[in-house]
Amino acid sequence: MVTLSRIYTRTGDHGTTRLVDNSVAAKSDPRVEAYGLVDAANAAIGLALALDDGVLPEAVRQALGVIQNELFDVGADIANPLVANPPWEPLRTVQSSVDRLEHWCDEFGDPLPTLRSFILPGGNAVGAQLHVCRTAVRTAERAAWRAVEAYGTQTSQDPEQTPGGVNELAITYLNRLSDLLFILSRVANKAAEGSSDEVLWVPGGERNADHQPDRHSQA
């Protein structure tokens, strides 16, 4: 249980913050940037759920609720350098969470019609916001890889000498999640139904000044 008795602490007023292991890091540190962007992606998912007025199946809403909780885990994981013999058991992303994302990709994606073109981000409000979520997660994933470039993925035997690396499984989670959010945007935009809110991309060579993209069932 986490107790937050005071929201402002004044401890970050000089450009530094503390990681989960209590080590000090600059707020411009790539690790801090990465878990901050994970938080931003989580907020974007929260907005998608808030916008939902019955568009999303209940199973999708429940999945997104699980994902919001797991994104806190992912952020905590990235914020906690890999070290040998930590003083307490760290919160880490686990393979079963990644496996569950892949299962949901199959469960929600298999009924959808095959895509014949790329999709323009948009559709109804929930579907459009899920596209925003997808890109937010991709942004967080790229930032996490920049943290890997800085710190690697190895476990530090002596954190006083060498900072610990980043848990690569946390980044795998973000990768799979972006795939799932693309699928869920199609679910929200009713891609499997006769009247879809999806709009297909029309390549430049096929467009003209009078052309307006049509909505497609993508069947």
Image (spheres, helix red, strand yellow):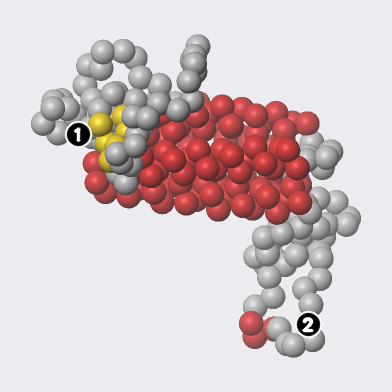
Image coordinates of residue 202 in percent, x first then y, are: 69, 75
In space, the residues marked 2 and 1 are separated at their CA atoms by: 55 Å
On screen, 203 above or below 125?
Answer: below
Image coordinates of residue 155 in percent, x first then y, are: 22, 29
Q: Which mark is residue 46?
A: none
Name the residue nearer the viewer: 102 or 135: 135
Quadrant of the image for the C terminus? bottom right
Question: Would residue 112 be seen by someone viewing this image from the given angle?
Answer: no
> Mark 2: few, some, or many residues within 10 Å (few <14, many ≥20)?
few
On screen, 49 above or below 93?
Answer: below
Question: Residue at the spot x=73%, y=38% of the render?
Answer: 50
2 vs 1, front mark: 1
> Mark 1: few, some, or many residues within 10 Å (few <14, many ≥20)?
some
Query: Tag 1: residue type?
Result: Pro
Q: Please report whichever mark, 2 or 1, sits nearer to the chain's N-terminal start.
A: 1
Question: Residue at the spot x=73%, y=50% of the render?
Answer: 127
Question: Quadrant of residue 75 in the image?
Answer: top left
Query: Tag 2: residue type?
Result: His
Q: Residue 211 carries which label?
A: 2
Name the residue nearer the viewer: 27 or 47: 27
Question: Would residue 184 be seen by someone viewing this image from the given angle?
Answer: yes
For label 1, the SS is loop
Q: Residue 163 carries which label?
A: 1
- Left or right of 162? Residue 32 is right
Whether the residues at callouts 2 and 1 have beta carbons within 8 Å, the answer is no
Question: Quadrant of residue 93 in the image?
Answer: top left
